[in-house]
Image (spheres, rainbow, N blue to C red):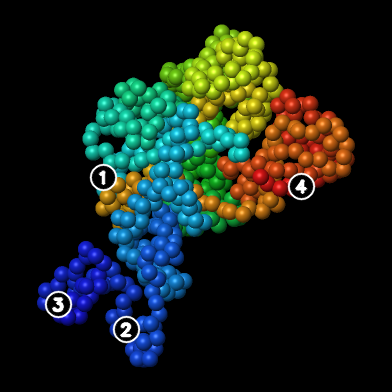
């Protein structure tokens, strides 16, 4: 009895182990909460035990103990580990091996103190150990959004394994700085339980409360959701500009085609074959052998899922890829009689499947394009929609099946409603589509006029906010009659329209990073539209993260813990300090800052943006190059010849590509 009491005293605060006439409950308690405790601890000599007992433990308030605890909390968040990981024997062994003096806190400490502390932390300065976790705190997200001129929200609902309903809200905005250029930033704001009915009024109330909590009610909010009617009503009642997810729109049009009788029958046959190979180990083994014999890629067959976009397309595409191996396998005598009844497709079926894949490919490409998160996408909707309508126009060479598929898609896309003014404006502010070739002359001029008016309005607003500075400047300097904001915006728009159009592969945010100095008023408007996503996929992708957090083993997690874990996991940033300049490559530069004299010298320098090579060129934060050295007379001549074009809008990346093989460029130093 004394031993039991001793164990109870050393249990974590708030936890007790009840027992009656046996020790079963106590033993279960020890296994669950004290896995490091052995049933029969080995005998330790008195002298050795005395030495071990004299080793000082780390004070729990020491800097090292705090750093270790915070690192473990960050590990739980980043790797989506359950709080109970700190009770696992293997994990405790690792911690004990790395720092024997450290006493690992109980899981409740992480759930009720460390994780909430990370979420609510407001410190302004952080140590190197703390910096990654610090970037995810609520205070830092609030500070980041404060700099945005406009914020777009994506919103969607999901249900956990515990049948609790949650709504996740994600914010998107463009941040611009002289050092890092323009970048698209996304933050998961909250994942809150919503036990009420998901009516438009209830969702609207949740959205308004979220906007108030995150201090973004004045950010001219745009809400991007799926096409559900309650979301449309919610946006109206919350007084948000609403944009329907175009990926959903394209998917719904594709579903109309997939429901055609001929298409549905063909898909059912392909699905039956794919399902057979998923459940038959013998069939799968024979298929893999035939793939090897026929020199085909050893890809597994796919089965469509009604809730997954493009899954029917991908199932059919994979079937066609593996059709020779499938046919050979289904003819194998090693399969049982009832299995050989699953016949492969005949030539006519295969031809129809190929035509179906060809007809649906533009829809698949459109949904994939709209599902990207790292680049602006609302600006793509208008040109993509126009292209899809063109691709689904009937053609005299089309087969009856293709004609029916195209008609079903075309009719559905033609009837879809969209916020045309917003979409046209977004496209006009993407330098790749600024010519607006998909619009009539009247629609183009109306769109350009809208941008000019908004640019002038933003300029006037800024001037009104700084009247003292303007008055002081006017008193010191005598200037001619100022040109109106509208006239300046109109002049900028004229120059912007005449600028060279970048390729479709160029990042519009990088383009604006370089050219905002030429069109500052238009750039201010661009920030407000290029932040808007073309789909709500970002909110839906949180579901998989939340699903990993709310597993069957952790279905009893409190709603506030789910909110904090999802927030921290999605917003945490891994920081790599002291990057070597040799790991960077030139992407795009500012306007050239050299003369002919400089070019004639043995080396010259200019300022440029760079990306870390090891993580690729897209989605990384650009660094400003302090100086760049170029050697090779041919390369210098090529750059000299292109200097005028660079002034007009070409990036230095293009100039360097033209000069490949003519010389070498070396980064001298990073700012």
Which residue is rendered at x = 34% and y = 51% of the image?
A: 116
Residue holding disc 4: 666
Give the number of the disc on residue 22: 3
Which is more N-terminal, label 3 or label 4? 3
Front position in the image: 310 or 479: 479
Q: Is mark 4 on a helix, strand or loop?
A: strand
Instruction: Identify whether 135 is placed above or below 588.
Output: below
Which is more N-terminal, label 4 or label 2? 2
Q: Is mark 1 on a helix, strand or loop?
A: loop
Quarter of the figure with residue 412: top left
Give me the C-alpha separation between circle 4 and circle 3.
76 Å
Residue holding disc 2: 41
Which is more N-terminal, label 1 or label 2? 2
- Marks 2 and 4 close (CB-CB < 8 Å): no
- The answer to whether any part of residue 76 appears in the image is yes
Give me the C-alpha separation between circle 2 and circle 3.
21 Å
Give me the C-alpha separation between circle 3 and circle 1.
38 Å
Give the number of the disc on residue 669: none
Which residue is rendered at x = 39% and y = 51% of the image?
A: 118
Instruction: Identify whether 584 is placed above or below 392.
Output: below
Residue holding disc 1: 163
Which is more N-terminal, label 4 or label 1? 1
Give me the C-alpha separation between circle 2 and circle 1.
44 Å
């Amino acid at each position: 009895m004394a031993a039991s009491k001793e164990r109870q005293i050393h249990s974590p605060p708030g936890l007790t182990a009840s027992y009656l006439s046996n020790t079963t409950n106590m033993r279960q308690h020890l296994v669950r909460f004290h896995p490091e405790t052995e049933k029969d601890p080995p005998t330790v000599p008195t002298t050795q035990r005395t030495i071990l007992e004299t080793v000082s433990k780390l004070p729990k308030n020491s800097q090292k103990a705090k750093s270790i605890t915070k690192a473990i909390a960050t590990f739980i968040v980043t790797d989506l580990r359950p709080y109970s990981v700190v009770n696992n024997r293997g994990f405790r062994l690792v911690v004990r091996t790395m720092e024997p003096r450290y006493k690992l806190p109980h899981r409740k400490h992480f759930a009720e103190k460390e994780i909430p502390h990370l979420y609510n932390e407001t410190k302004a300065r952080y140590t190197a150990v703390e910096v990654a976790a610090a970037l995810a705190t609520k205070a830092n997200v609030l500070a980041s959004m404060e700099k945005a001129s406009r914020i777009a929200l994506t919103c969607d609902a999901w249900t956990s394994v515990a049948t609790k309903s949650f709504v996740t809200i994600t914010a998107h905005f463009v941040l611009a700085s002289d050092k890092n250029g323009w970048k698209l930033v996304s933050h998961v704001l909250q994942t809150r339980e919503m036990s009420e009915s998901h009516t438009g009024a209830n969702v609207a109330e949740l959205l308004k409360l979220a906007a108030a909590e995150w201090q973004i009610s004045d950010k001219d909010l745009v809400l991007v959701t799926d096409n559900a009617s309650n979301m449309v009503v919610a946006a109206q009642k919350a007084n948000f500009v609403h944009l329907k997810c175009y990926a959903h729109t394209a998917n719904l049009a594709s579903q109309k085609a997939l429901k055609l009788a001929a298409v549905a029958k063909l898909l059912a046959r392909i699905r039956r074959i794919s399902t057979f190979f998923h459940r038959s180990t013998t069939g799968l083994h024979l298929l893999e052998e035939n793939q090897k014999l026929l020199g085909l890629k050893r890809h597994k067959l796919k089965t469509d899922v009604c809730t997954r976009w493009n899954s029917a397309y991908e199932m059919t595409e994979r079937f066609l890829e593996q059709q020779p191996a499938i046919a050979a396998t289904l003819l194998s005598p090693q399969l049982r009689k009832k299995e050989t009844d699953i016949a492969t497709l005949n030539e006519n079926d295969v031809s129809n499947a190929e035509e179906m894949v060809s007809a649906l490919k533009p829809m698949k490409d459109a949904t994939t394009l709209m599902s990207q998160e790292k680049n602006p996408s609302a600006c793509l909707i208008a040109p993509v929609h126009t292209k899809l309508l063109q691709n689904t126009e009937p053609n005299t060479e089309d087969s009856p099946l293709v004609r029916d598929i195209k008609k079903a898609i075309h009719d559905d896309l033609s009837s879809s409603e969209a916020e045309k003014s917003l979409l046209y404006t977004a496209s006009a502010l993407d330098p790749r589509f600024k010519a607006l070739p998909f619009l009539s002359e009247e629609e183009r001029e109306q769109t350009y006029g809208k941008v000019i008016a908004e640019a002038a309005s933003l300029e006037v607003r800024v001037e009104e906010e700084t009247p003292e500075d303007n008055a002081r400047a006017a008193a010191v300097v005598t200037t001619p009659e100022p040109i109106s904001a509208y006239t300046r915006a109109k002049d900028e728009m004229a120059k912007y329209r005449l600028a060279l159009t970048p390729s479709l592969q160029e990042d519009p945010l990088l383009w604006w990073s370089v050219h905002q100095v030429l069109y500052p008023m238009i750039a201010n408007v661009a920030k407000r539209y290029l932040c808007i996503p073309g789909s709500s996929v970002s909110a839906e992708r949180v579901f998989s993260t939340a699903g990993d957090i709310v597993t069957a083993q952790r279905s009893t997690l409190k709603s506030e813990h789910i909110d904090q874990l999802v927030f921290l996991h999605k917003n945490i940033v891994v920081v790599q300090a002291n990057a070597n300049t040799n790991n960077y490559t030139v992407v795009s530069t500012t306007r050239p800052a050299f003369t002919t004299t400089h070019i004639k010298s043995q080396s010259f320098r200019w300022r440029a943006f760079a990306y870390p090579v090891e993580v690729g060129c897209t989605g990384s934060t650009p660094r400003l190059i302090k100086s760049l050295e170029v050697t090779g007379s041919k390369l210098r001549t090529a750059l000299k010849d292109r200097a005028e074009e660079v002034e007009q809008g070409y990036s230095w990346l293009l100039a360097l590509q033209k000069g490949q093989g003519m010389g070498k460029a070396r980064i001298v130093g990073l700012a």
